[in-house]
Image (tube, rainbow, N blue to C red):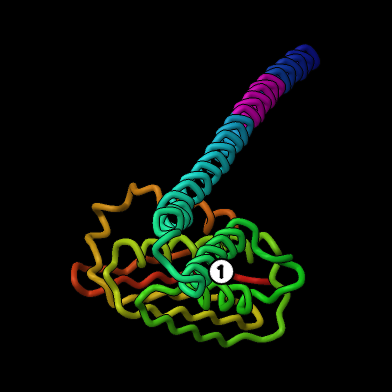
Amino acid sequence: MWRWENQDQIVGWIWIGIGLFSLTTLLITLLVINYLKSIKKNKQKVSRIVRNTRNEHWENILLLQEQDRERLAEELHDNIISQLNLLRLNLNDKNPEELNRDLKRSMQLIRELSHNLTPPDLDEIELADLIADYLEQINKNIEVIFRHISIQKHISSPVKLNLFRIVQELITNILKHAEATRVEVTLRISLNYLMLTIEDNGRGFIAESQSGGIGLRNIQSRTQKIKATYKLKTQPEKGTKFIACMAIQ
């Protein structure tokens, strides 16, 4: 009698063990299925992010190209073509010295435009020299102050180009819209960080009203490309200050 009861207990424990094993197997299977589903969802999410990033990248490239075309067309129309047209109209009324002076002025404008569109070999020139050379060409009625504190640190060509274009964008906006009499550009390069500051004493503006402007979007796109952060401080009649900072290796 005792032997049969003992066998029944053993059989019962075997069934309990089989039940626990089956339940554990079921739970593990469900966990594996959920894990595989999670991996699939994450892959789809990553693919979607990569696709959106790629599309955004191309949109930014097209935006920058369009900005460069607009700048070229505006420079040609407002400066070079206007100067040459005045030369043509006054060809018979000016003496050779005046014509020579006007021609030199037109040639200088063309040189500036060429420099702005295609800066010199970026591997062969320091960022401070690149900015200084550009600022020296500004012949508007405005005081331009450039300060730079830098060590011998390698700055990649893409970083140089994007920072140079940011300087161009801001200086162009200052000359056209700020009504400023002074602009200060400061470049600081240390072992680990680079900081660019551009400040004017112009009429400023309400930052929120210009947040969607093409110029600011252009600057935002370029700072994102070089993994920099920037801040724009401005108030009506109190000038504008732009600060960009990035880590360098």
Q: Is residue 183 above or below residue 29?
A: below
Name the residue nearer the viewer: 109 or 185: 109
Secondary structure at badge 1 equals strand
**Front residue of this view, candidates 22 and 194:** 194
State the extent of the magenta-drawn residues as a range: 25-44
* Residue 75 seen from this side: no
> Residue at position x 53%, y 55% from top?
222
21 relative to 207, above or below: above
- Residue 26 located within the stretch drawn in magenta: yes
Query: Is residue 112 found left or right of 6 in the rendered image?
Result: left
Image coordinates for residue 5, horizontal then vertical, percent: 73, 15
Q: Quadrant of residue 177?
A: bottom left
Q: Quadrant of residue 227?
A: bottom right
In which quadrant will I find the C terminus? bottom right
Mark 1: which amino acid? Answer: Met
From the viewer's perspective, tell me whether residue 144 is left or right of residue 34: left
Task: Name the residue tied to disc 1.
Answer: 246
Res 57 visible: yes
Magenta-colored segment: predominant secondary structure = helix
Q: Report the label total.
A: 1
Q: Which of the two residues, 177 or 100, is positioned nearer the viewer here?
A: 100
Point 73% across, 22% down: residue: 21
Image coordinates for residue 230, horizontal then vertical, percent: 45, 65
Crowding at mark 1 (Cα within 10 Å: few <14, some 14-19, many 20+): some
Residue 184 locus on image (x, y percent): 41, 80
Instruction: Single out the residue that lies furthest toward the left.
Output: 237
Please identify the quadrant where the N terminus is shown. top right
Instruction: Residue at 61% x, 29% y: name it.
Output: 38
Residue 116: in magenta span: no
Image coords of residue 114 (percent x, y)? 61, 59
Question: What residue sits 67% from the left and 86% below the top?
Answer: 151
